[in-house]
Image: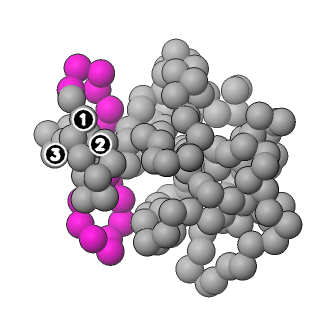
């Protein structure tokens, strides 16, 4: 928690399907003083935007049908991205839902400044080795019910 709470702007997500719910972790980060933003898919085949998640503002469906802040919410750049995933491996490779949304977004964020990417998963989602392509963006760490693993390079 000490390392994660050192970030001031944190991106969470609304879980889809069997993705683990980041709510408890996000609640602790908000209590520690972090500002929460949520990803928004605004246009197909582009990167995600991050908008301030204000408890007083209602969420709307984005391009992918995921609940997200509307266009009136402030756009911000997260320092910590908590990323959903379907699988990960011991090298930090991540398999998402497809479409490349997070890969495009993380490549952009990494090119424009420092961002830390934390995968949130169940330990049973770890694969021996995931196939990767040059555009795939790795995790810096993963948090499971069995603990925290740092893949930082």
Q: Which residue is mark 1?
A: 59
Residue appearing at x 33%, y 48% in the figure: 66
Q: Is residue 39 left or right of residue 20?
A: left
Residue 7, compared with residue 121, is above or below; it is above
Q: Which residue is mark 2?
A: 68
Residue 2 among magenta residues: no
Residue appearing at x 81%, y 71% in the figure: 129
Q: CA distance from mark 2 to mark 1?
A: 5 Å
Q: Mark 2 or mark 1: which comes first in sequence?
A: 1
Residue 44 among magenta residues: yes
Q: Position of residue 57 (x, y in %)?
A: 21, 26
Q: Secondary structure at mark 3?
A: loop
Residue 23, compared with residue 16, is above or below; it is above
Task: Indicate which label's residue lies in the foreground, 3 or 1.
Answer: 1
Picture quadrant where residue 151 is located: bottom right
Q: Residues within 10 Å of mark 2 (few under 14, many from 20)?
A: many
The N terminus lies in which quarter of the figure?
top right
Q: CA distance from mark 2 to mark 3?
A: 9 Å
Residue 151, compared with residue 149, is above or below; it is below
Q: Secondary structure at mark 1?
A: loop
Q: Is residue 20 left or right of residue 142?
A: left
Q: CA distance from mark 3 to mark 1?
A: 10 Å
Q: Which residue is mark 3?
A: 71
Colour mode? one colour
* Pointer 2 with pointer 1, Cβ within 8 A: yes
Q: Residue pushed farthest left? A: 72
The C terminus lies in which quarter of the figure?
bottom right
Count of numbered tags: 3
Numbered range of the magenta stretch: 40-57
């Amino acid at each position: 928690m000490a390392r994660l709470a050192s970030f001031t702007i944190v991106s969470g997500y609304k879980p889809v399907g069997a993705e683990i719910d980041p709510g408890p972790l996000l609640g602790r980060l908000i209590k520690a003083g972090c500002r929460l933003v949520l990803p928004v898919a605004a246009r197909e085949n582009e990167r995600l935007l991050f908008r301030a998640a204000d408890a007083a503002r209602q969420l709307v469906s984005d391009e992918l049908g995921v609940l997200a802040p509307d266009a009136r919410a402030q756009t911000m750049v997260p320092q910590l991205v908590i990323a959903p995933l379907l699988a990960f491996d011991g090298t930090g490779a991540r398999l998402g839902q497809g479409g490349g949304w997070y890969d495009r977004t993380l490549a952009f964020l990494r090119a424009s400044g420092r961002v830390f990417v934390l995968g949130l998963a169940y330990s049973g989602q770890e694969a021996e080795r995931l196939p990767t392509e040059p555009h795939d963006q790795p995790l810096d760490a993963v948090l499971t019910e069995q603990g925290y693993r740092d893949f930082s390079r």
